Image: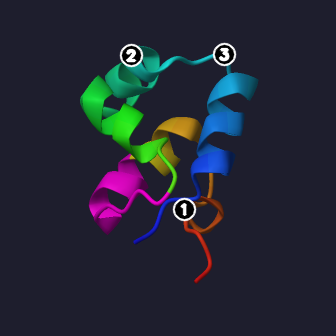
Amino acid sequence: MKVNYKVLSKEMARQCLNPSDLAKISGLSASTINRLRLEGAETRGKTLGLVARALKLDIDVLIMAE
């Protein structure tokens, strides 16, 4: 799945979270969060699901339309 990195970065800023904060909340590593914030990043559904749950977002908003 391709990550909508703009939505991810905007939502992290809105919630005042840095990659380390989101990593702790989601159970992922900070390097994974940083990778997801890059343009063109792709990941598995489970990883994106963990991020969506941590941010309290519907996963659909984090998936980039192709």
Please tell me which residue is depicted at 31% across the width and 53% down the height of the picture: 47
Give the number of marks. Answer: 3
Please tell me which residue is depicted at 36% across the width and 41% down the height of the picture: 35
User: Could you tell me the amino acid type at mark 1?
Assistant: Ile
Please tell me which residue is depicted at 62% across the width and 78% down the height of the picture: 65
Q: Which residue is mark 2?
A: 20
User: Could you tell me the amino acid type at mark 3?
Assistant: Cys
Q: Are marks 3 and 2 in contact (CB under 8 Å)?
A: no
As for residue 20 lying within the magenta part, the answer is: no
Mark 1 secondary-structure assignment: helix
Vertical relation: 47 (above or below) 12: below
Residue neighbourhood size for the residue with mark 3, other residues' Cα within 10 Å, grouped as few (<14), some (14–19), many (≥20): few
Q: CA distance from mark 3 to mark 1?
A: 20 Å
Q: Are marks 3 and 1 in contact (CB under 8 Å)?
A: no
Vertical relation: 33 (above or below) 13: below
Q: Position of residue 62 (x, y in %)?
A: 58, 59
Q: Nearer the viewer, residue 50 or 40?
A: 40
Please tell me which residue is depicted at 28% across the width and 65% down the height of the picture: 44
Q: Which residues are magenta?
A: 40-50
User: Could you tell me the amino acid type at mark 2?
Assistant: Ser
Mark sitting on residue 59:
1
Residue neighbourhood size for the residue with mark 2, other residues' Cα within 10 Å, grouped as few (<14), some (14–19), many (≥20): some
Mark 2 secondary-structure assignment: helix
Quadrant assignment for the N terminus: bottom left
Q: CA distance from mark 1 to mark 2?
A: 20 Å
Mark sitting on residue 16:
3
Mark 3 secondary-structure assignment: loop
Q: Are marks 1 and 2 in contact (CB under 8 Å)?
A: no
Q: Position of residue 31 (x, y in %)?
A: 27, 29
Q: CA distance from mark 3 to mark 2?
A: 11 Å
Vertical relation: 47 (above or below) 66: above
As for residue 41 lying within the magenta part, the answer is: yes
